[in-house]
Amino acid sequence: MQNKKTAIYPGSFDPVTNGHLDIVERAVKIFDELVILVADNPEKKYMFNSFDRKNFIEKSVVEFKNISVRTHEGLLADYLSEKKIQIVIRGLRFVSDFEYELSLALMNRKLNGQIETIFLAPREELIYLSSTMVKEIASFGGDVSRWVPECVKTALKNKYSTRKQ
Ligand code: ADP
């Protein structure tokens, strides 16, 4: 029997956007199993805690039986070694992503020689989209419905309305 091909899509997902979900939909067609790994880095400041970030993704991918969502604190390379997974998915938008993404891919490979990173490009209209931009638009009361799932839109609304009080 052939082994199942599993890939990991790691990221901050603070919060998940339709750009991330576009990459998820592409990856899930290529691999048998996809693990979305929500990074919990104590050095990084997130708007949403890892529980919420994971929850938003879970709600957005319920229809996929071959996707699981996990959180992880620590090195991605260690997680991959422990789970015996070799393929990492990352999204590429602009040339500006490229330098960071390439250095990350090479660093991960240095830490664990088995790791291969695969870059996927989103639909053209999502290429400008980032979690940072969505947070900025929401902070000024702008409508983010076409960029994020409903649960994220609601959470952003709540976050900014409580902040203003
Ligand atoms: P990180 O902090 O690890 O970069 P992000 O949540 O910002 O986490 O992004 C995770 C991955 O998703 C990265 O590879 C990033 O380039 C990709 N990504 C983010 N937004 C988009 C988008 N709109 N289209 C395609 N890929 C994206």
Image (tube, rainbow, N blue to C red):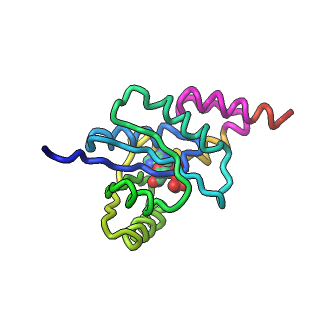
Q: Is residue 128 visible?
A: no
> Residue 22: which quarter of the image?
top left
Q: Position of residue 17 (x, y in %)?
A: 52, 39
User: In which quadrant of the rendered image does the N terminus lie?
Assistant: top left
Vertical side of 140 occupied by 114: above or below: below
Please name whichever residue, 111 or 104, is drawn nearer the observer in this view of the structure.
Answer: 111
Q: Position of residue 101 (x, y in %)?
A: 44, 63
Image point (30%, 65%), residue name: 114
Please name whichever residue, 88 or 111, is drawn nearer the observer in this view of the structure.
Answer: 111
Q: Is residue 55 visible?
A: yes
Q: Position of residue 135 (x, y in %)?
A: 65, 42
Image point (63%, 30%), residue name: 143
Image point (38%, 50%), residue name: 8
* Range drawn in magenta: 138-159
156 drawn magenta: yes
Q: Position of residue 142 (x, y in %)?
A: 67, 33
Query: Which residue is at the far front?
Result: 82
User: In which quadrant of the rendered image does the C terminus lie?
Assistant: top right
Image point (66%, 61%), residue name: 43
Vertical side of 138 occupied by 38: above or below: below
99 drawn magenta: no
Query: Which residue is at the far right?
Result: 165
Please name whichever residue, 55 or 165, is drawn nearer the observer in this view of the structure.
Answer: 55
